[in-house]
Image (cartoon, helix red, strand yellow):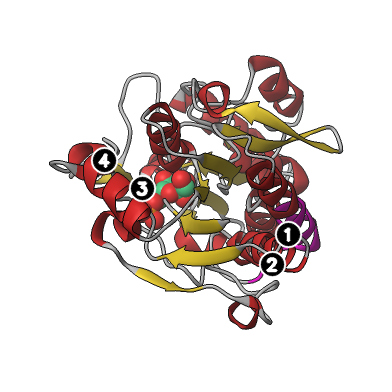
């Protein structure tokens, strides 16, 4: 078979590990051939390819980012986009696509499957918000980076008797905030799934200062106060209808300083959470996803996404994986609330 591979959406550590596993097993075990599409859906849309042989995947297991490049291109918002992809794939003699992406990229994969293309999906995102899989690769690395940042910020916050607000990524889902906040012993964790009362947050922060500790507040970029909206960096909308979030932490630090009388600072972790080498956990998960994705392609089972269930890798319909986001359930948030204040 001749198989196209692409990575779409926001990058995350472990993408190269998937590509390596797909190509290694695809060539060495099954004798297939590969074509790398550049920059997500832009690749098949504009015929942008690169070679993807054994030598191209040497030494990439531990490398962050993606050797294929990525983009947030949505072929369904481009005139004749789907026909162009179908035509490009046919002209390149490609039998199937391995698509590595999050909700948006895999949402397109699902629609293209309905339109007759052979696609197998692999779930990536630091946000861990894809349904159908217990974890996505990239999440463990992002949580580890955020946790290390919290540990470091705690010591300087304590020296200066300041509150430190740490803003992490998470547009609609607070998984990174929840896990890094729990791992780092945060005094308050704020997630998009639950609006927060600024007076309550200020009371928790004050209580922490009263006990002579420097409070650490972890806030997801998509968290919203009970009487306000999302903090936007730009209201420009991307091809999938998303605005660019950011700034809730800066707003929160200013409010807390004013309400508690204690100096409060904010650190926005931003893309640091997405860069660099994947953790061992993510390398293993990404590698296993890649191995199982090429098995699905080889067996001609399309329209599925490989997924982690417990310790097993299974196949779930792309339709199920992209139907709704996996957000933090109230009972998981309640576990963390025990440590607030
Ligand atoms: O979906 C992953 C993610 O990292 C989100 O947490 C974040 O809101 C978004 O991507 C940022 O995207 P970009 O890198 O395009 O600004």
State whether label 3 is within 8 Å of ligand 1.
no
Residue 246: which disc?
Answer: 3
Q: Earlier in the sequence, mark 4 or mark 1?
A: 1
> What residue is shown at x 23% (from left), y 42% (from top)?
83
User: What residue is shown with label 4?
Assistant: 82
Secondary structure type for disc 2: helix
User: What residue is shown with label 2?
Assistant: 27
User: What residue is shown with label 1?
Assistant: 30
Q: Earlier in the sequence, mark 1 or mark 3?
A: 1
Mark 1: few, some, or many residues within 10 Å (few <14, many ≥20)? Answer: some
Above or below, comparing residue 59 to residue 326 in the picture: below
Q: CA distance from mark 1 to mark 3?
A: 45 Å
Secondary structure type for disc 4: helix
Above or below, comparing residue 41 to residue 53 in the picture: above
Given residues 136 and 216, the one toward you in this image is 136
- Mark 2 touches mark 1? (CB < 8 Å): yes
Report the quarter where the N terminus lies: bottom right
Secondary structure type for disc 3: loop
Dot in front, 4 or 1: 1
Q: Earlier in the sequence, mark 2 or mark 3?
A: 2
Left-right relation of 262 to 136:
left
Q: Earlier in the sequence, mark 4 or mark 3?
A: 4
> What residue is shown at x 35% (from left), y 48% (from top)?
247
Q: CA distance from mark 4 to mark 1?
A: 29 Å
SS majority, magenta: helix
Q: CA distance from mark 2 to mark 3?
A: 43 Å
User: Which residues are drawn in magenta?
Assistant: 277-288
Dot in front, 2 or 4: 2
Q: CA distance from mark 2 to mark 1?
A: 6 Å
Q: CA distance from mark 2 to mark 4?
A: 29 Å
């Amino acid at each position: 078979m001749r198989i196209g591979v692409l990575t779409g959406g926001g990058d995350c550590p472990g993408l190269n590990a998937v590509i390596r596993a797909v190509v290694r097993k695809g060539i060495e075990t099954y004798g297939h051939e590969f074509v790398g599409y550049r920059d997500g859906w832009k690749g098949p849309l504009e015929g942008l390819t690169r070679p993807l042989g054994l030598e191209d995947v040497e030494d990439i297991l531990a490398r962050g980012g993606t050797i294929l490049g990525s983009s947030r291109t949505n072929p369904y918002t481009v005139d004749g986009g789907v026909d162009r992809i179908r035509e490009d794939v046919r002209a390149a003699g490609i039998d199937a696509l391995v698509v590595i992406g999050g909700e948006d990229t895999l949402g397109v994969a699902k629609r293209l499957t309905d339109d007759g293309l052979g696609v197998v999906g692999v779930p990536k995102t630091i946000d861990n918000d894809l349904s159908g899989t217990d974890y996505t690769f990239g999440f463990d690395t992002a949580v580890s980076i955020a946790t290390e940042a919290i540990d470091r910020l705690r010591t300087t916050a304590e020296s200066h008797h300041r509150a430190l607000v740490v803003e992490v990524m998470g547009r609609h889902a607070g998984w990174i905030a929840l896990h890094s906040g729990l791992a780092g012993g945060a005094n308050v964790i704020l997630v998009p799934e639950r609006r927060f009362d600024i007076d309550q947050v200020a009371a928790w922060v004050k209580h922490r200062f009263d006990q002579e500790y420097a409070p650490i507040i972890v806030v997801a970029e998509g968290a919203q106060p009970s009487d306000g909206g999302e903090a936007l960096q730009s209201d420009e909308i991307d091809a999938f209808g998303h605005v660019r979030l950011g700034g809730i932490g800066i707003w929160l630090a200013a409010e807390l300083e004013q309400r508690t009388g204690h100096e409060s600072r904010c650190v926005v972790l931003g893309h640091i959470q997405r860069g660099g080498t994947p953790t061992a956990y993510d390398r293993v998960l990404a590698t296993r996803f890649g191995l199982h994705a090429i098995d699905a392609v080889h067996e001609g089972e399309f329209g599925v996404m490989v997924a982690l269930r417990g310790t097993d890798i299974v196949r779930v319909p792309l339709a199920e994986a992209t139907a709704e986001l996996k957000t933090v359930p109230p009972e998981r948030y309640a576990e963390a609330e025990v440590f607030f204040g």
